[in-house]
Image: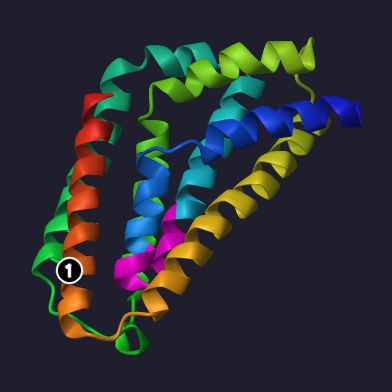
């Protein structure tokens, strides 16, 4: 694929990925409450979900995915329910100084799977590929083209997810007062619950 075309796709995808939405809000909230590992785990899940849709588009199944209403709804509501669960846990959590906070591997795995589920359940994702790919590729996707687009997506997401995690982590490191930590936990919890409501409603 021509380099100029890849740049055009990268620019369009960056706007899509960096736009305010439940994913970026959740990445920030999880980083503030549980540390950068939690934010990166959820972010990696979102990237995995995006790449799955890219593969579906490559095999001409993007339109089929957009028609899988029940399965997509189950994924979306399941992911939203987990965000509510995490939000309630953060709201009621005891204030723990950042240096003492440890995210368990089980929690990282659950965050990663939630990121995948919420992206697979996003009805806008298939439409994004259906609308964009024909204008970028102008022909049937080849394995090499899919690999190039996947690389662009990963690089863009490293910038977007990494930027959100870094900013939230720097803010988190400044926290030391238990009252402030409790307020941040509750703000992050409320944000996750709000994000769940947005996800469930879309």
Tell me: residue 143, above or below residue 65: below
Instruction: Give the image location of residue 41, x and y in percent.
Output: 45, 61
User: Does the magenta segment cover residue 25?
Assistant: no
The residue stretch that appears in magenta: 31-42
When asked about the image quadrant of residue 137, the answer is top right
Q: With 104 as the anchor, is 139 left or right in this view?
A: right
* Numbered-mark total: 1
The residue sitting at the bottom extreme is: 100
Q: Nearer the viewer, residue 189 or 56?
A: 189
Q: In this view, does 106 lie above or below 177?
A: above
Residue 190 spot, x, y in % from top left: 17, 52
- The residue positioned 15% from the left and 79% from the top of the image is 179
Q: Is residue 60 visible?
A: no
From the top left corner, tell me how far across and down residue 98 is, in percent: 33, 83
The residue lying at 32 percent from left, 80 percent from top is 175
Q: Quadrant where the C terminus lies?
A: top left
Circle 1 is placed at which residue position?
Answer: 183
39 falls in the magenta region: yes
Rendered position, 175 above or below 120: below
* Residue at 49 percent of width and 39 percent of height: 49
Q: Quadrant of the N terminus?
A: top right
Residue 99 visible in rendering: yes
Task: Specify the color scheme.
Answer: rainbow
Query: In the visual, does 68 lie left or right of 165?
Result: left
């Amino acid at each position: 694929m021509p380099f100029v075309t890849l740049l055009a796709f990268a620019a369009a995808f960056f706007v899509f990925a960096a736009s305010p939405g439940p994913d970026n809000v959740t990445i920030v909230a999880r980083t503030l409450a549980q540390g950068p590992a939690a934010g990166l785990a959820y972010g990696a899940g979102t990237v995995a979900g995006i790449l799955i849709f890219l593969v579906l588009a490559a095999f001409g199944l993007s339109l089929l995915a957009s028609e899988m209403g029940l399965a997509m709804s189950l994924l979306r509501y399941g992911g939203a329910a987990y965000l509510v669960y995490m939000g309630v846990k953060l709201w009621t959590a005891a204030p723990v100084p950042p240096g003492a906070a440890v995210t368990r591997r089980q929690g990282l795995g659950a965050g990663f799977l939630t990121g995948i589920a919420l992206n697979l359940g996003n009805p806008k994702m298939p439409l994004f590929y259906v609308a964009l790919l024909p204008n970028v590729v102008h022909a049937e996707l080849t394995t090499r083209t899919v690999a190039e687009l996947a690389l662009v997506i990963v690089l863009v997401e490293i910038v977007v997810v990494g930027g959100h995690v870094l900013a939230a982590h720097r803010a988190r490191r400044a926290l030391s007062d238990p009252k402030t930590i409790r307020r941040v936990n509750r703000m992050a919890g409320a944000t996750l619950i709000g994000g769940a409501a947005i996800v469930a409603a879309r």
